[in-house]
Image (cartoon, grey):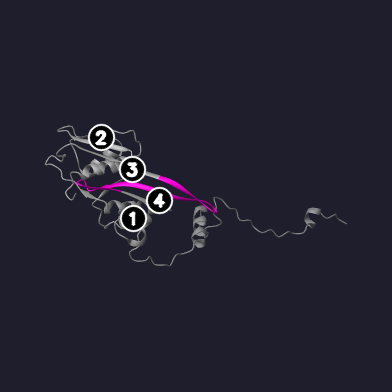
């Protein structure tokens, strides 16, 4: 007996030829796909498509016209009362204080306001108003000043024709014409003369009173002596 060669008795093994990949190419019929093209395709497939049509006349936030006032569509920046007629009188507060009145349930507070009203053309008045609110007190004082307004007879140079002097309560004031010096006065007397349109005068307080309301009323009493309707 002859020994068989183990190599000859080895079963034949079927082997499948392997395909070698080089540089991303499988074979001649396979197309090379780049990684960047794959990522772009995935993003495009996941991104939603906007099918809405833009509205006509729509402007972005940066192109908004701010001259029209924005909200409400009111012209002129949305200011209320912009076309209201301005008052012909100028006013200035000379005193505002809080006063208390003792009641059964406690103290009740009110406000007292005094102001001078004038048109700087010879008309001037002093008013006093009291109310629970400052705005209402000023409104009452304005109405009182209009009711008590006087017309001063001024010269061509907007001065007074002669010396005048008056007294109200503890206040005494003297006003003298002074050509070329302008308005020389202090305290609330200056406010009265300025709103009356008086110039080239010198005013002197002859009393020690520091009450601005009494000083203003004393100046009004002095101007009444040269007023038109005295």
Quarter of the view holding residue 75: bottom left
Q: Is residue 148 left or right of residue 111?
A: left
- Local secondary structure at mark 4: helix
User: How packed is label 3: few (under 14 Cα within 10 Å), some, or many (20 or more)?
Assistant: many
Residue 213's disc number: 3
Q: Earlier in the sequence, mark 1 or mark 3?
A: 1
Mark whose residue sits in front, 1 or 3: 3
Q: Position of residue 162 (x, y in %)?
A: 15, 37
Mark whose residue sits in front, 3 or 4: 3
In the rendered image of this protein, does residue 200 appear above or below residue 152?
above
Q: Earlier in the sequence, mark 1 or mark 2?
A: 1
Q: Earlier in the sequence, mark 3 or mark 4?
A: 4
Are the residues tagged 3 and 4 within 8 Å (C-beta)?
no
Are the residues tagged 1 and 3 within 8 Å (C-beta)?
no
- Cα–Cα span, label 3 and label 2: 15 Å
- Cα–Cα span, label 4 and label 2: 28 Å
Which one is nearer the viewer's eye here, 136 or 11? 136
- Check disc 4 and report the residue beneath it: 134
Residue 185's disc number: 2
User: How packed is label 2: few (under 14 Cα within 10 Å), some, or many (20 or more)?
Assistant: some
- Local secondary structure at mark 1: helix
Which one is nearer the viewer's eye here, 213 or 164? 164
- Cα–Cα span, label 3 and label 4: 17 Å
- Cα–Cα span, label 1 and label 4: 44 Å
Q: Earlier in the sequence, mark 3 or mark 2?
A: 2
């Amino acid at each position: 007996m002859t020994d068989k060669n183990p190599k000859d008795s080895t079963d034949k093994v079927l082997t499948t030829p392997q395909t070698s990949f080089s540089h991303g190419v499988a074979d001649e019929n396979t197309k090379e796909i780049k990684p960047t093209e794959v990522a772009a395709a995935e993003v495009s497939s996941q991104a939603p498509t906007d099918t809405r049509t833009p509205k006509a006349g729509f402007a972005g936030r940066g192109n908004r016209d701010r001259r029209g006032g924005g909200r409400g569509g009111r012209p002129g920046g949305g200011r209320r009362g912009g076309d209201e007629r301005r008052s012909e009188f100028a006013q200035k507060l000379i005193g505002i204080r809080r006063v208390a009145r003792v009641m059964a349930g406690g103290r009740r507070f009110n406000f007292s306001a005094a102001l001078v009203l004038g048109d700087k053309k010879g008309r001037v008045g002093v008013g006093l108003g009291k109310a629970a609110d400052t705005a209402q007190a000023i409104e009452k004082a304005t109405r009182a000043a209009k009711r008590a307004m006087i017309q001063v007879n001024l010269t061509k140079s907007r001065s007074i024709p002669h010396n005048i002097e008056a007294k109200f309560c503890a206040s005494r004031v003297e006003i003298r014409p002074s050509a070329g010096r302008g308005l020389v006065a202090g305290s609330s007397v200056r406010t009265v003369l300025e709103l009356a349109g008086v110039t080239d005068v010198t005013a002197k307080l002859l009393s020690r009173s520091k009450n601005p309301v009494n000083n203003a009323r004393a100046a009004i009493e002095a101007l009444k002596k040269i007023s038109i309707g005295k």
